[in-house]
Amino acid sequence: MDVYKNLDWEAVEKLKISSGSKIVLKRDLNFLRSEENISVQFLLDGEVKGSVDCHLCLDNKDIDENSRNYLYPYFTESMNILLGRLISTDPMLSALKIKLSPPKCTIYSKTIDSRLMSELVVYSLVINDFDFDVVLNLNLTVIN
């Protein structure tokens, strides 16, 4: 069974990560294209198999190296928190046994084009004065 079509993405509309930072579900229907981004991949195993690829879009952001060194682990932990909340608040997923792998981080950019991705959700990661687009590309299947 394809998990994407059955998930309630509205369940996590806004999530506070820490003081001054939050994740907000975006409802913008315009396509998103990113040439400069970092990625975190989580593999799922158990009664749900597949992967969730999270991409932090850095296009047109003027971020110095010290801020980037802070941003990478912060983004990774934010995605870990978001996925945990999505799994625990969804009635179907919370009833299943799911093992979430440690995150695999990639700092090499690749082109992200939402027009070419069928199963995705877009969030905003807001950290103080910065607002970043985050694309979650889902490839999940329930194993019977």
Image (spheres, helix red, strand yellow):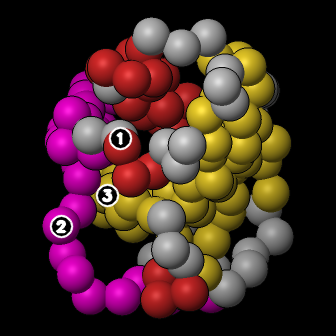
Residue type at numbered disc 2:
Arg
- Assess whether mark 3 and mark 1 are in contact (beta carbons under 8 angstroms): no
x and y percentages locating residue 35 in the rendered image: 62, 87
State how far apart marks 1 and 2 are (Cα). Answer: 16 Å
Residue that badge 3 annotates: 124
Q: Residue at x 33, y 57 (%)?
A: 123
Q: Secondary structure at mark 3?
A: strand
From the image, tell me which residue sits under label 2.
Answer: 27
Q: Quadrant of residue 85?
A: top left
Q: Which residue lies at the image location 74% right of the left edge and 76% below the top edge?
A: 109
Name the residue that disc number 1 marks.
7
Q: Residues within 10 Å of mark 2 (few under 14, many from 20)?
A: few
Return the residue nearer the eye: 49 or 67: 49
Q: Which residues are magenta?
A: 9-35
- Front position among marks 2 and 3: 2
Dividing the image into 4 quarters, which one contains the C terminus? top right
Circle 1 crowding by C-alpha within 10 Å: few under 14, some 14–19, many from 20: some
Residue 68 showing in the rendered view: no
Camera-nearest residue between 62 and 112 = 112
Magenta span includes 34 = yes
Label whose residue precedes the other's in the sequence (2 or 3): 2
Under circle 1, the secondary element is loop
Residue 13 pos. (x, y %): 18, 42
